[in-house]
Image (cartoon, helix red, strand yellow):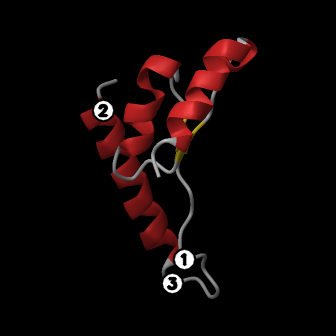
């Protein structure tokens, strides 16, 4: 999916969660919404910088130490 699609889906999920929990007593102020698509060193930084994306689930790329290290490094450089 494109970055725009990822952002739109995450915003929709956040909105649905807010509506579902806003009436609940002691509802959490914020629920982290993570992206679980194909995350690689080449796209992780862009995805993590997207509005409404709170993190990523790294799958197969985590099996390659060099690739996983680049993802971590890119995430650390965001802020």
Q: Tell me which label, 2 or 3, sits earlier in the chain.
A: 2
Between 17 and 58, which is closer to the camera in this rendering? 58
Picture quadrant where residue 5 is located: top left
Q: Residue 23, labelled with which disc? A: 3
Between 44 and 11, which is closer to the camera in this rendering? 44
Residue that badge 1 annotates: 29
x%, y% of residue 25?
62, 88
Q: What is the secondary structure assignment of the residue under circle 1? A: loop
Residue that badge 2 annotates: 3
Rendered position, 75 above or below 24: above
Between 27 and 3, which is closer to the camera in this rendering? 3
Q: What is the secondary structure assignment of the residue under circle 3? A: loop
Residue drawn at x 54%, y 77% as measured from the top left? 29
x%, y% of residue 15?
38, 62
Q: Tell me which label, 3 or 1, sits earlier in the chain.
A: 3
Residues at marks 2 and 1, CA–CA distance in whole angstroms: 25 Å
Q: Are marks 3 and 1 in contact (CB under 8 Å)?
A: no
x%, y% of residue 36?
55, 32
């Amino acid at each position: 999916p494109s970055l725009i699609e990822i952002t739109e889906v995450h915003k929709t999920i956040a909105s649905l969660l807010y509506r579902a929990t806003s009436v609940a007593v002691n509802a959490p102020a914020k629920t982290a919404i993570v992206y679980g698509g194909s995350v690689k060193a080449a796209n992780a930084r862009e995805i993590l910088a997207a509005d409404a994306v709170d993190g990523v689930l790294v799958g197969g790329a985590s099996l390659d130490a060099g690739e996983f290290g680049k993802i971590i490094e890119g995430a650390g450089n965001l802020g």
